[in-house]
Image (cartoon, helix red, strand yellow):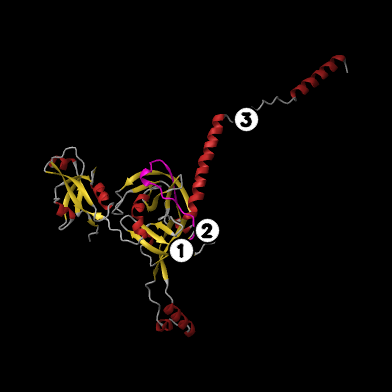
């Protein structure tokens, strides 16, 4: 090989080697280390999660499952009917004796409740236990068996009931909070036994307060929440971040998602002594029918800019009639507090017990006056 050819050959080899050299790989930047702000956010998230976990661990053991049973109204088949059904004689006689000697029950209500005392007192909704001849309570725990409860007292107008099982120092109980101090936006949890799946804990916030236009009860002052409330949750507690009960889960709003309602716990606290003693809860009423005051009515009745409730009718012999209230009067105050509409008047009167004397502020023919009314026992009109 000539010198020139050898030189060109070596140059080609060198170029080939250079062309096969791997391309340099760009350096991958190191992952960004967590700064102080990120660590604070993570610590805050863990703290909030820890609050919810503690909330659940504290509250759930005090929640119970309730089953309302009613004696089966269907009579046992007669021996002749069993024989006519071509049941073998021995089996027919056995079925007849068993049906004759044993009482059968059907489940007419299920729900939840919560222990408020180691003596076995349980708060729940009236509608959970109202139809039952027997109430069976299952405590929270895989090994717990059903125990029959005594129905102590109920208040259908506020949907509150108190039942009792045998006292036991081992019971976990819940503290009753102050529903009047609840705030829109605060964290709450609804606990209960939805669809009989077992103990469930759903988280949300207080969405609204003082809801009184659902048309479900005479005394409506509901706490609205977006914590999921499903069939079986009724009677269970609505608890705040401290684990205190601020409401009794009661109503599901089927026409919307994540809207549920709870009876404020202060309503139950106000009648708790009477419920424990088995006393009847007689709530008050004045004996009037009311409607809201429209701007047109305000102008006609010479109370411009006023809010209140127009008296439409007054029952004969009612406390309102005795106090001198007439149709056409406008109620503007109840026990010293202004009222904006007829819902507020109704709620204020039903919140008090029968026999309570109240001051009612009126406007009649443009003149203001105050009358004293002694409330009578509330009765539904047919």
How far apart are the two marked residues, 2 and 3, measured between alpha carbons? 47 Å
Q: CA distance from mark 1 to mark 2?
A: 17 Å
Q: Please give the name of the residue rendered at 35% of the width and 50% of the height, measured from the top-left corner.
A: 266
Frontmost of labels 2 and 3 is 2
Mark toward the start of the polypeptide (1 vs 3): 3
Above or below 180: residue 13: above
Region in magenta: 168-190
Query: Which of the two labelled residues, at mark 1 and mark 2, occupies the earlier sequence position?
Result: 2
Q: Residues within 10 Å of mark 3 (few under 14, many from 20)?
A: few
Residue 344 point in image, percent of width and height: 26, 47
Q: Is residue 273 left or right of residue 136?
A: left
Residue occupying the point 38% across, 59% down: 162
Q: Secondary structure at mark 1?
A: loop
Q: Residue furthest left?
A: 365
* Residue found at the far top of this picture: 4
Secondary structure state at the residue bearing disc 3: loop
Q: Which percent across, then down, holds residue 72?
A: 39, 71
The quadrant of the rendering that contains the N terminus is top right
Reading the image, the residue beneath label 1 is 166
Real-space Cα separation, disc 1 to disc 3, in angstroms: 61 Å
Q: 273 or 313: which is nearer to us?
A: 273
Q: Are marks 2 and 3 in contact (CB under 8 Å)?
A: no
Q: Nearer the viewer, residue 147 or 310?
A: 147
Between marks 1 and 3 in the image, the one whose residue lies nearer the viewer: 1
Q: Say which label, 2 or 3, has the lower sequence index.
A: 3
Q: Residues within 10 Å of mark 2 (few under 14, many from 20)?
A: few
Splitting the image into 4 quarters, where does residue 365 fall?
top left
Are discs 1 and 3 less than 8 Å apart at CB?
Answer: no
Residue 7 in the image, given as x and y percentages of width and height: 83, 16
On residue 31, the disc is: 3
Residue linked to disc 2: 141
């Amino acid at each position: 090989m000539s010198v020139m050819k050898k030189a060109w050959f070596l140059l080609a080899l060198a170029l080939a080697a250079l062309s096969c050299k791997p391309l340099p790989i760009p350096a991958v930047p190191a992952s960004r280390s967590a700064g102080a702000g990120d660590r604070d956010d993570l610590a805050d998230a863990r703290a909030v999660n820890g609050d919810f976990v503690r909330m659940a661990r504290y509250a759930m053991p005090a929640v119970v499952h309730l089953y309302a049973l009613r004696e089966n109204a269907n009579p046992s088949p007669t021996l002749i009917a069993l024989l006519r059904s071509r049941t073998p004689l021995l089996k027919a006689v056995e079925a007849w004796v068993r049906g004759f000697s044993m009482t059968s029950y059907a489940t007419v209500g299920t729900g939840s409740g919560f222990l408020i005392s180691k003596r076995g007192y349980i708060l729940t909704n009236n509608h959970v236990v109202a139809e039952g001849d027997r109430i069976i309570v299952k405590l929270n725990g895989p090994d717990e068996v059903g125990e029959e409860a005594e129905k102590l007292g109920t208040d259908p107008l506020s949907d509150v009931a108190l039942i009792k099982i045998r006292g036991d120092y081992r019971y976990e109980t819940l503290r009753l909070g102050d529903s009047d101090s609840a705030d829109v936006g605060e964290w709450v949890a609804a606990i209960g036994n939805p669809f009989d799946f077992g103990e469930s804990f759903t988280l949300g916030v207080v969405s609204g307060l003082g809801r009184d236009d659902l048309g479900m009860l005479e005394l409506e002052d509901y706490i609205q929440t977006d914590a999921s409330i499903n069939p079986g949750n009724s009677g269970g507690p609505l608890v705040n971040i401290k684990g205190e009960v601020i409401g009794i889960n009661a109503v599901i709003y089927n026409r919307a998602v994540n809207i549920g309602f709870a009876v404020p716990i202060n309503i139950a606290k106000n009648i708790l002594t009477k419920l424990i003693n088995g006393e009847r809860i007689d709530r008050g009423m004045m004996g009037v029918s009311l409607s809201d005051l429209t701007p047109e009515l305000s102008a006609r009745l010479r109370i411009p800019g006023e809010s209140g409730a127009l008296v439409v009718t007054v029952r004969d012999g009612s406390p309102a009639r005795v106090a001198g209230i007439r149709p056409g009067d406008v109620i503007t105050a109840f026990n010293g507090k202004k009222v904006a509409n007829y819902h507020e008047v109704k709620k204020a009167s039903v919140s008090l017990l029968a026999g309570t004397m109240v001051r009612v502020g009126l406007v009649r023919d443009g003149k203001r006056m105050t009358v004293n009314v002694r409330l009578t026992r509330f009765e539904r009109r047919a």
